[in-house]
Image: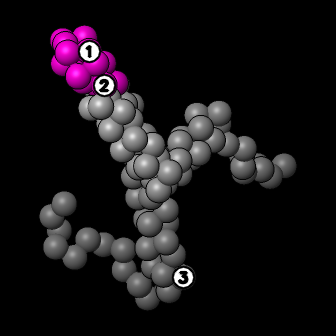
Amino acid sequence: MSAKPNNKKSLFEAFATQATRAAGSNMAFIIATLIIIVWAATGPIFNYSDTWQLVINTGTTVITFLMVFLIQKAQNKDAIAIQIKLNEPVAANANASNRVVSGKI
């Protein structure tokens, strides 16, 4: 019995793919810019209070924290895809060598 490849994406994989696409879009940049403009415009209304500053600091910290993991996930996926593509010519050519040239990694 042959093993079938699992082509189903995990829930996280599907979410990460969509979130990566959304976060890298023009619309995401526009929305982030508008949020900063609205926040800055409300400064005088809230007398530039500590709470007013805390809102933007907390929001940007949480988003940055989550984006670090999302970016790492995307980079890991890209690195694996590149490695697979680079391995293909070595596997296809019987005379090719897969040893490390410099010997240092």
Q: Position of residue 28 (x, y in %)?
A: 46, 47
Q: Nearer the viewer, residue 83 or 71?
A: 71
Q: Position of residue 81 (x, y in %)?
A: 49, 62
Among numbered discs 3 and 1, the one appearing first in the sequence: 1
The residues colored magenta run: 42-60
The residue shown at (17%, 68%) is: 103
Which of discs 2 and 3 lies nearer the camera? The answer is: 2
Q: Badge 3 local density, few (<14 within 10 Å), some, or many (20+)?
A: few
- Dividing the image into 4 quarters, which one contains the C terminus? bottom left
Q: Position of residue 64 (x, y in %)?
A: 32, 33
Above/below status of 90 relative to 55: below
User: Could you say which disc has been placed on residue 55 in the image?
Assistant: none
User: Could you say which disc has been placed on residue 42 in the image?
Assistant: 2
The residue shown at (43%, 73%) is: 86
The quarter holding residue 36 reads: top left
Q: Amino acid at mark 1?
A: Phe
Q: Position of residue 97 (x, y in %)?
A: 36, 80
The residue shown at (41%, 84%) is: 96
In this figure, which residue is indicated by the disc labeled 3? Answer: 92
